[in-house]
Image (cartoon, rainbow, N blue to C red):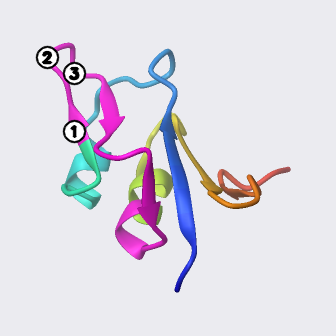
């Protein structure tokens, strides 16, 4: 079995660009206020969700390993 990621969107940072939905339409939705949220709180590790996080212009998406809490994105500085 592969890694699972916890997927979180900081709605206080999200600007509603929709880039996450473009990269991973099965993983993210915009609500009526154009705020992003993950479809599920956890997802199998995959390139589409990572591309969505990397493509967010304000880095509102955080990915962590579901079993350990280790940060996958954004990279820790």
Magenta region includes residue 46 = yes
Q: Are marks 3 and 2 in contact (CB under 8 Å)?
A: yes
Question: Which quarter of the figure has residue 26?
Answer: bottom left
Q: Residue at (51%, 34%) from the top-left corner?
A: 60
Q: Would you name the residue on which mark 3 appears?
A: 34
Q: Please state which of the two labelled residues, at mark 3 or mark 1, is closer to the viewer.
A: 1
The correct choice, above or below, for 72 with respect to 7 in the image is below
Secondary structure state at the residue bearing disc 2: loop
Work out whether 15 lies above or below 9. above
Q: Residues within 10 Å of mark 1 (few under 14, many from 20)?
A: some
Provide the residue designation for mark 2. Answer: 32
Tag 3 near tag 1, CB within 8 Å: no
Q: Is residue 75 left or right of residue 43?
A: right
Residue 33 location (% of width, % of height): 21, 13
Res. 32 image quadrant: top left
The one of 34 and 43 positioned closer to us in this rendering: 43
Q: Which residue is mark 1?
A: 29
Going by the picture, which residue comes out furthest to the bottom? 1
Q: Find the magenta span and give its range.
A: 29-49
Q: Which callout, 3 or 1, points at the residue further toward the start of the chain?
A: 1
Seen as rendered, the residue at the extreme right is 77
């Amino acid at each position: 079995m592969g890694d699972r990621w916890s997927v979180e969107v900081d709605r206080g940072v999200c600007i509603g660009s929709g880039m996450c939905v473009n990269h991973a339409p099965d993983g993210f939705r915009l609500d009526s206020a154009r705020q992003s949220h993950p479809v599920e709180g956890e997802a199998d590790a995959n390139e589409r969700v990572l591309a969505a996080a990397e493509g967010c212009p304000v880095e509102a998406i955080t990915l962590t390993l579901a079993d350990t809490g280790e940060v996958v994105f954004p990279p820790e500085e």
